[in-house]
Image (tube, helix red, strand yellow):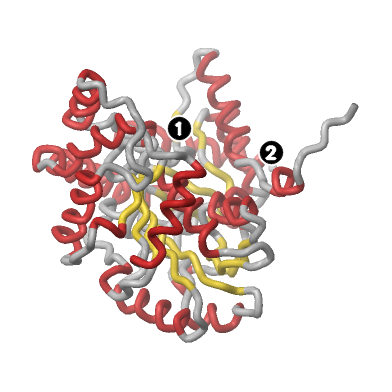
Amino acid sequence: MATSYSARSRAIEPFHVMALLARANELQAAGHDVIHLEIGEPDFTTAAPIIAAGQAALAAGHTRYTAARGLPALREAIAGFYAERNGITLDPERILVTPGGSGALLLASALLVDPGKHWLLADPGYPCNRHFLRLVEASAQLVPVGAETHYQLTPELLERHWNADSVGALVASPANPTGTLLGREALAALSATLKARSGHLVVDEIYHGLTYGCEAASVLEVDDSAFVLNSFSKYFGMTGWRLGWLVAPPEAVPELEKLAQNLYISAPSMAQHAALACFQPETLALLEERRHAFGQRRDYLLPALRSLGFRIEVEPEGAFYLYADISAFGGDAYRFCQHFIETEHVAFTPGLDFGHHRAECHVRFAYTQSLERLEQAVERIARGLRTWAAVR
């Protein structure tokens, strides 16, 4: 008897990069030296003070459920972080601690979008955003963006693409895969445009803290009614701990808490206790050193790739990605990525994972390896471009 699965499951696309990653791992297991520039995960391990706090939490028996909104002490620490970094006075009661940034996105999607309705999203953008909308029987209205708008939505684009089924917009700053930011004025303009249409503004600030030569503005500095997604995965380096948070307007919190109780009960208790150490001065000092290292990597890899013929029109201000146009080399992005895995053992991500707009001629590089490894990668890519020209 044939197995029948849901339409929503069939509609959600896989990460194309996972097949490439599986092949890269096969080659690595066979003894090849593979340079991984495909996965958006910091190469640094979780900072020692955070690990120590997690170990202490386990030793103290903090292994039970917490409140659905998270530990009060952690919500207070997050609010204090906004006060220190952004000058925002934020009531901790408006913060929900979630299982990763994904948990925050799930809550926001479930709360704000009815079946058949949609948010507007930039294309290219992080693929899971549109997939979570599909999970709640809603959809993403993908809006093509390019260098001319800094790969971000604008008020003009919102007005052009808004229709009767639109209920809001989700933007990211810094953005994945392009690393671009939205400044205060841009965020305020988006907010005003959406409020005029009674739409919601949801901002992914997951890469806050990882900016270079500038600071990222929080949408809460200009719009207190916006919904904010954030995570301990990127700047704080806690990917495997699965911890994030959502900031919401006060009136939305009871509904979000109800959803959290039903969807996941609470975020991991040990991870929450560990995350309290994120805001200690010694931890923040270490995280700033890591930010400096990411900045050095960007400043090396960006001109190096441009010198090889990759077209990167906008200098990324944050995250740890370069989104590169490979039109000069011909061929399609997926085959291009396959070529470099097989011949040079360098793995990076095809644009297909980030949307549809010119996806076939873009790839994403994650500079989540040391400078030495990036230098090796550039040498291999230069060599691989010569062989690519012969086989494409």
What residue is shown at x 59% (from left), y 48% (from top)? 353
- Left or right: residue 330 versus residue 30 is right
For this orientation, the residue located farthest to the bottom is 196
Q: Nearer the viewer, residue 157 or 330?
A: 157
Mark 2: which secondary structure?
A: helix
- Mark 1 touching mark 2, by CB under 8 A? no
Q: Position of residue 137 (x, y in %)?
A: 66, 56
For this orientation, the residue located farthest to the left is 281
For this orientation, the residue located farthest to the right is 1
Give the quarter of the image for residue 187.
Answer: bottom left
Residue type at numbered disc 1:
His
In this figure, which residue is indicated by the disc labeled 1? 36
Residue type at numbered disc 2:
Val
- Left or right: residue 79 versus residue 111 is left
Q: Work out whether 79 lies above or below 12.
A: below
Earlier-in-chain disc, 1 versus 2: 1
In the picture, the disc for residue 391 is: 2
- Left or right: residue 134 versus residue 273 is right
Question: What distance separates the C-alpha of mark 1 from that of mark 2?
Answer: 23 Å
Q: Is residue 337 visible?
A: yes
Q: Badge 2 local density, few (<14 within 10 Å), some, or many (20+)?
A: few
Mark 1: which secondary structure?
A: strand
Q: Work out whether 77 lies above or below 221.
A: above
